[in-house]
């Protein structure tokens, strides 16, 4: 994902980095939506016994052709002109990790904190809610899979629009609006999901998904714009994956733990609100990059 974000940022036409950069999370959303769709079809067509015996392998086997296509595409992909220019000019560092940790600590921390907030929104707003709807609230798994597939495709369709708007109106305004949307919507939508009415749960999930295309689509080009070309891939990878571990890897566990400890079903919502506050405070230190040239 960080390679894709880097490549698209360096290959996009002037003034269109937001639009083209949004296609990295579009791929993620389409992948998640398609995965949920396959899981929904599998769980609908097979009995619980068949799923336990062999059916759970079917989605994994169906993914194998995509792995092959991805390897072929990656093998044929050339480096961006921006990167090739830096390489030809002898500007690439011999120790990029050391250079990032020595000279780009501010950008590293900025992207780490923003990625923590955006991953918390994705993992709590989509991944954890899948578990929450089925395990905590008792909605049918097959119905929930179909819902997650629809939301994944819905979010993917809105991301290029959000990216294009960031080219026109600036990255920071869009990201602030997205994180504020999470803060405002998370508790009311979780309350809707907890009514026991699946129709209201569907409404709640779609409302909660509204900030997701904005945050996801606009943060990816913003991440890439924080580092110069000579260390962009390295810096972005270190910072983003650190934010993914904190905001993505830990949040479903923390959300489940908080719910069990406090007995409050809305506890995951408070966790997301804390993550959005951290991201919003971080944005105060970020300068607008939509109309700036990429640093080399």
Image (cartoon, rainbow, N blue to C red):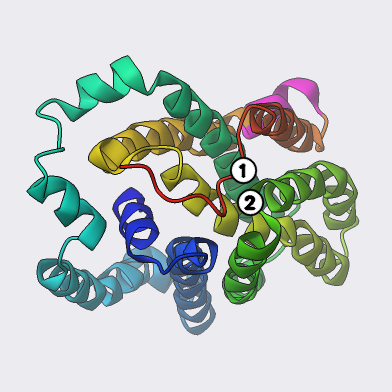
Of 272 and 87, the residue lying toward us? 87
Q: Residue at x 77, y 57 (%)?
A: 208
Q: Secondary structure at mark 1?
A: loop
Residue 80 shows in this picture: no
Secondary structure predominantly adopted by residues drawn in magenta: helix
Q: In the rendered image of this protein, does residue 208 appear above or below residue 231?
A: below
Mark identifier at residue 14: none
Q: Quadrant of residue 64?
A: bottom left
CB within 8 Å, label 1 to label 2: yes
Q: Position of residue 118 (x, y in %)?
A: 59, 43
Identify the residue shown where x is 45% and y is 76%: 38
For residue 171, the mark is: 2
Determine the residue positioned at 28% across, 72% down.
63
> Residue 177, image x and y in percent?
78, 50
Mark 1, residues whose alpha carbon is within 10 Å: few (<14), some, or many (≥20)? some
Q: Name the disc covering residue 288, or none.
A: 1
Give residue 278's position: percent from left, percent from top.
68, 27
Q: Position of residue 39 (x, y in %)?
A: 47, 72
User: If you read the primary sequence from the N terminus, does the residue marked by circle 1 or circle 2 appear first?
Assistant: 2
Residue range corresponding to the magenta coloring: 255-263
């Amino acid at each position: 994902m960080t390679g894709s974000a880097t490549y698209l940022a360096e290959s996009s036409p002037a003034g269109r980095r937001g639009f083209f950069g949004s296609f990295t999370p579009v791929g993620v959303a389409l992948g998640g939506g398609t995965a949920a769709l396959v899981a929904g079809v599998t769980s609908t067509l097979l009995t619980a016994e068949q799923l336990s015996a062999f059916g759970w392998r079917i989605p994994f086997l169906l993914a194998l052709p995509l792995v092959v296509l991805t390897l072929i595409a990656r093998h044929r992909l050339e480096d961006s002109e921006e990167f090739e220019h830096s390489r030809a000019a002898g500007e690439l560092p011999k120790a990029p990790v050391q250079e990032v940790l020595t000279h780009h600590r501010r950008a590293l921390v900025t992207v780490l904190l923003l990625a923590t907030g955006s991953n918390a929104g994705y993992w709590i707003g989509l991944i954890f809610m899948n578990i929450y709807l089925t395990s905590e609230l008792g909605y049918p798994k097959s119905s929930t899979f179909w819902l997650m597939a629809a939301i994944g495709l819905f979010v993917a369709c809105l991301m290029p629009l959000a990216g294009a708007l960031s080219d026109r109106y600036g990255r920071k305004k869009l990201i602030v609006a997205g994180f504020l949307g999470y803060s405002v919507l998370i508790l009311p939508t979780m309350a809707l999901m907890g009514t026991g009415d699946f129709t209201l749960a569907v409404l709640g999930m779609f409302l909660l998904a509204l900030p997701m295309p904005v945050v996801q689509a606009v943060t990816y080009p913003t991440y890439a714009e924080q580092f110069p070309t000579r260390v962009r891939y390295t810096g972005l990878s270190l910072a983003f994956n650190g934010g993914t571990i904190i905001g993505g890897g830990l949040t479903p566990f923390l959300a489940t733990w908080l719910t069990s400890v406090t007995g409050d079903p809305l506890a995951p919502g408070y966790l997301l609100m804390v993550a959005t506050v951290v991201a919003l405070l971080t944005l105060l230190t970020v300068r607008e990059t939509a109309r700036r040239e990429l640093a080399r």
